[in-house]
Image (tube, rainbow, N blue to C red):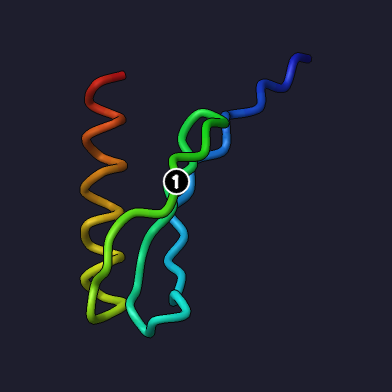
């Protein structure tokens, strides 16, 4: 029996030193650097998920 590991895909939201929020996307083992200066964590999460969906569509 072969067990295939799916590549790691995550969206991480972080608070920067200036108090703004950003996101980091890890897709197929590639980490895309922190993006954005959002005023709320919810905004950063929403945009991060949108970016991830766009990457998945591109395939």
The answer to whether 17 is drawn above or below residue 7 in the figure is below
Residue lying at 33% horizontally and 78% vertically, measured from the top left: 20
Q: How many other residues sit within 10 Å of disc 1, few (<14), some (14-19) or many (≥20)?
A: few
Report the quarter where the C terminus lies.
top left
Q: Toward the viewer: 15 or 53? A: 15
The answer to whether 55 is drawn above or below residue 15 in the figure is above
Which residue is farthest bottom?
Answer: 19
Viewed as shown, does residue 39 lie left or right of 28?
A: left
Q: Toward the viewer: 46 or 22? A: 22
User: Image quadrant of residue 34?
Assistant: bottom left
Residue 13 position in % (x across, y down)? 42, 66
Name the element at disc 1.
Answer: strand
Residue 27 position in % (x across, y down)? 46, 35
Viewed as shown, does residue 32 lie left or right of 6?
A: left
The answer to whether 46 is drawn above or below residue 24 in the figure is below
In the picture of the structure, the residue carrying the numbered disc 1 is 33
Residue 19 position in % (x across, y down)? 37, 85
């Amino acid at each position: 029996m072969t067990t295939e590991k799916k590549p790691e895909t995550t969206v991480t939201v972080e608070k920067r030193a200036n108090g703004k929020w950003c996101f980091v996307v890890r897709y197929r083992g590639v980490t895309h650097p922190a993006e954005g200066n959002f005023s709320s964590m919810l905004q950063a999460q929403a945009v991060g998920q949108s970016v991830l969906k766009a990457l998945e569509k591109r395939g």
